[in-house]
Image (spheres, rainbow, N blue to C red):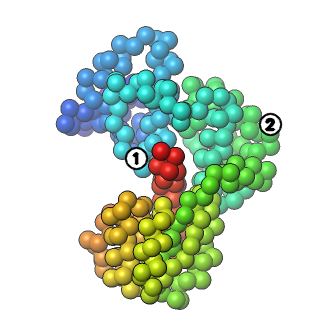
């Protein structure tokens, strides 16, 4: 695979040309994903003045980073320059960028004092839409001065005050309705203890329903923003409900015990399926999936 410099983060990375688009993989803009840039746009972006590129490229890099973290496919063209840079979703003040970093840390952990690694810092300052590493470090130090985070090198921890502050801010955002669909009685206590707190952390208010009452289930699903469906038992009803949700544009997360991973290969390909064996596996995978889904769900509601 060929390599090329990403204009927005200045890193040399793998790229390929497909359908008149250059696809950049693994740069600082999309470290665990990729983004595409129309072929003709590269020269247009590269021809911008030094002052304009210094202003615009960090914003575009932050836009790509935060979009790909949410699981979105990002296609950039030169015509998008003004739209991205002038978007109301782009943080402008230092305080807005502080909250963006706080929210990122909050969603990476289960509680205060839990270590979160961001390394190297020089490749992650776009998390807060910072224009450079110096501004990112300045934001970090402000959060330390407020006693909201602790830092040791590239290891970060939310303090209790930082955790409470972030939770309070997120609580001001009206929680989105979510349905948890269950069947297997023996697993219900695990779900009732584990899943609602996670959903609350990511901005959802959960309601439990059972597949035994399918009419009620479908009515509640039609009013929700997210369906979490346990497909460990009664799979025909569960898959029907999940398919119904997908058909009307509801986000779906399905879960299946690892021992049943071969049972539903076709039905679950597009259901954000989590295969799990231990409770810890389910918790970790749910957290990762919710982190990717929750911003896009809230953005859709805002529209």
How many numbered markers are drawn? Answer: 2
| Secondary element type, mark 1 | loop
Q: Quadrant of the N terminus?
A: top left
Regarding residue 226, the answer to whether it shows in the image is yes
Q: Which numbered disc flags the more N-terminal residue, 2 or 1? A: 1
Q: Where residue 157 appears, x then y in whole percent?
A: 70, 49
Query: Residues under labels 2 and 1: Cα distance?
Result: 34 Å
| Secondary element type, mark 2 | helix
Q: As displayed, is residue 205 above or below residue 11?
A: below
Is the residue marked by circle 1 packed among few (<14), some (14-19), or many (20+) residues within 10 Å? some
Residue at horizontal 49 percent and vertical 41 percent from the top:
66
Say whether residue 37 is left or right of residue 89: left
| Quadrant of res 128 | top right
Q: As displayed, is residue 267 above or below residue 133?
A: below
Say whether residue 258 is left or right of residue 166: left
Residue at horizontal 66 percent and vertical 40 percent from the top:
99
Q: Which residue is mark 1?
A: 72
Residue 145 is labelled as: 2
| Quadrant of res 79 | top left
Q: Where residue 281 appears, x then y in whole percent?
A: 51, 70
Q: Where residue 240 appears, x then y in whole percent?
A: 33, 76
Q: Nearer the viewer, mark 2 or mark 1?
A: 1
Say whether residue 168 is left or right of residue 191: right
Regarding residue 155, the answer to whether it shows in the image is no
Q: As displayed, is residue 170 above or below residue 232?
A: above
Is the residue marked by circle 2 packed among few (<14), some (14-19), or many (20+) residues within 10 Å? few
Say whether residue 43 is left or right of residue 71: left
Question: Foreground residue, 131 or 113?
Answer: 131
């Amino acid at each position: 695979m060929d390599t090329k410099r990403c204009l927005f983060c200045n890193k040399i990375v793998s790229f390929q040309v497909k359908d008149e688009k250059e696809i950049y993989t693994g740069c600082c803009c999309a470290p665990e994903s990729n983004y595409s840039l129309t072929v003709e746009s590269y020269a247009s972006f590269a021809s911008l003045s030094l002052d304009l590129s210094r202003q615009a490229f960090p914003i575009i890099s932050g836009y790509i980073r935060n979009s790909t973290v949410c699981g979105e496919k990002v296609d950039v063209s030169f015509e998008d320059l003004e739209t991205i840079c002038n978007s109301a979703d782009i943080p402008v003040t230092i305080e807005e960028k502080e909250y963006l970093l706080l929210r990122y840390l909050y969603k990476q952990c289960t509680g205060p004092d839990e270590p979160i690694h961001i390394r190297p810092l020089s490749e992650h300052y776009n998390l807060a839409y910072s224009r450079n590493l110096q501004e990112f470090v300045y934001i970090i130090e402000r959060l330390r001065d407020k006693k909201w985070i602790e830092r040791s090198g590239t290891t970060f921890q939310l303090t209790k005050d930082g955790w409470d502050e972030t939770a309070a801010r997120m609580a001001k955002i009206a929680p989105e309705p979510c349905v948890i669909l269950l069947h297997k009685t023996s697993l219900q206590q695990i779900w009732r203890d584990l899943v609602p707190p996670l959903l609350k952390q990511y901005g959802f208010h959960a309601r439990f329903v059972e597949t035994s009452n399918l009419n009620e289930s479908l009515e509640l699903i039609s009013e929700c923003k997210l369906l979490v469906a346990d497909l460990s038992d009664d799979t025909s009803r569960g898959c029907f409900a999940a398919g119904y949700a997908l058909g009307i544009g509801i986000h779906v997360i399905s879960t299946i015990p690892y021992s049943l991973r071969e049972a539903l290969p076709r039905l679950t390909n597009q259901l954000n399926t989590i295969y799990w064996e231990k409770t810890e596996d389910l918790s970790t995978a749910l957290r990762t999936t919710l982190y990717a889904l929750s911003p896009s769900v809230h953005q859709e509601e805002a529209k």
